């Protein structure tokens, strides 16, 4: 009886270990297959505190993404957060290929080290020259290097924090409005809507986006000059490549993009 009890206990423990390991391998393989099917997604390099907020906003915006994190101890947190992720070094070409960077629409480098961000964007730009790359910068003297290396935009946490502090003092109601928008459970966001060839030459009044989609355009970025026009009048003629800026949820955004693309 004693030997039987010991044998049964050992077999049960072994079964639990094997089943758990097999389950983990199956989940890992399933995630790899989902990553292999990604297209027009975002590669998020860095799953730390900054990456956590970025991942949440990408999820709220219903934008497909995969997070690449080098620290294996953060895997439980990535699992709890949900979404697709890879454990690996984002500066490694093989890891970025596993994240399908060649088919990505953009890459966000938000690792703590400027050196790692620099190597990552260099590798990413080589693999996908047409995607948009945004990088975090810790030391301000690294900004020029990141821009020369191919970053489309460089963001400093320190400068953003400083502007936020000043805005809290000067424009507290505007800040609270933007905070409420970002933290709300719905998907209302400030969105950008590109103007297509079919809508070129037509005015905002003719398109009547407020009546047809419930969207009010409060700014316009000119395609040829890059200048911004705030509160554009209804008779403002649009050009192909202009970018309209307005508040919209996902359904409104889909509707207004179709109207502006097709006229």
Image (tube, rainbow, N blue to C red):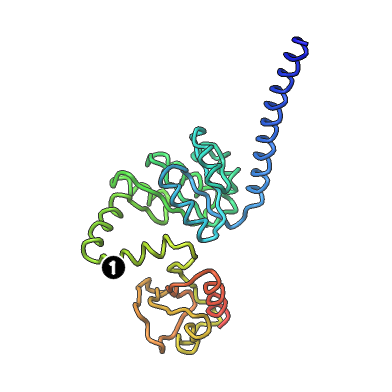
Residue 6: x, y in percent? Answer: 72, 13
Left or right of 107: which side holds 11?
Answer: right
Question: In which quarter of the view is residue 245 placed?
Answer: bottom left
238 and 174: which one is in front?
A: 174
Query: Which of 96/160 is in front?
Result: 160
Q: Secondary structure at mark 1?
A: helix
In the image shown, does 244 or 24 lie closer to the viewer? 24
Q: Residue furthest front?
A: 1
Residue 18, quarter of the rendered image: top right
- From the viewer's perspective, is residue 81 above or below residue 165? above
Q: Nearer the viewer, residue 134 or 79?
A: 79
Residue 65 x/y as whole percent: 55, 52
Which residue is under mark 1?
Answer: 173
Residue at x-position 50% and y-position 33%: 73
> Compared to 120, does 229 lie above or below?
below
Horizontal and vertical percent position of residue 121: 46, 47
Assess disc 1: are there few (<14), some (14-19) or many (≥20) residues with their C-alpha within 10 Å of its C-alpha: few
Please state the horizontal and vertical placement of residue 236, each as a whole percent of the image.
41, 86
Up-down relation of residue 224 to residue 110 (above or below):
below
The quadrant of the rendering that contains the C terminus is bottom right
Name the residue: 42% across, 60% down. 183
Q: Residue at x 60, y 48 (%)?
A: 100
Image label count? 1
The residue under the point 36% across, 62% down is: 179
Quarter of the N terminus within the rendering: top right
């Amino acid at each position: 009886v004693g030997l039987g009890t010991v044998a049964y206990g050992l077999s049960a423990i072994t079964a639990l270990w094997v089943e758990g390991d097999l389950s983990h391998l199956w989940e890992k393989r399933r995630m790899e297959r989902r990553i292999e099917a990604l297209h027009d997604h975002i590669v998020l390099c860095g799953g730390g505190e900054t990456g956590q907020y970025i991942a949440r906003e990408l999820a709220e915006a219903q934008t497909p993404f995969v997070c690449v994190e080098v620290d294996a101890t953060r895997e439980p947190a990535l699992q709890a957060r949900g979404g697709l992720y890879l454990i690996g070094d984002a500066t490694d070409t093989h890891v970025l290929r596993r994240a399908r960077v060649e088919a990505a629409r953009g890459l966000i480098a938000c690792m703590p080290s400027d050196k790692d961000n620099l190597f990552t964007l260099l590798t990413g730009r080589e693999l996908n020259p047409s995607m948009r790359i945004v990088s975090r910068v810790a030391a301000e003297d690294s900004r020029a290097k990141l821009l020369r290396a191919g970053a489309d935009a460089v963001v400093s946490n320190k400068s953003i924090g400083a502007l936020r502090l000043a805005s809290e003092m000067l424009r507290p109601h505007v800040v609270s409005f933007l905070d409420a928008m970002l933290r709300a459970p719905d998907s209302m966001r400030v969105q950008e809507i590109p103007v297509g060839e079919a809508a070129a030459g037509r005015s905002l009044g003719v398109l009547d986006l407020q009546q047809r989609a419930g969207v009010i355009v409060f700014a316009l970025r000119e395609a040829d000059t890059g200048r911004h026009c705030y509160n554009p009048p209804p008779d403002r003629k649009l050009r192909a490549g202009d970018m309209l800026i307005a508040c919209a949820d996902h359904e409104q955004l889909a509707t207004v993009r179709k109207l502006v693309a097709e006229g």
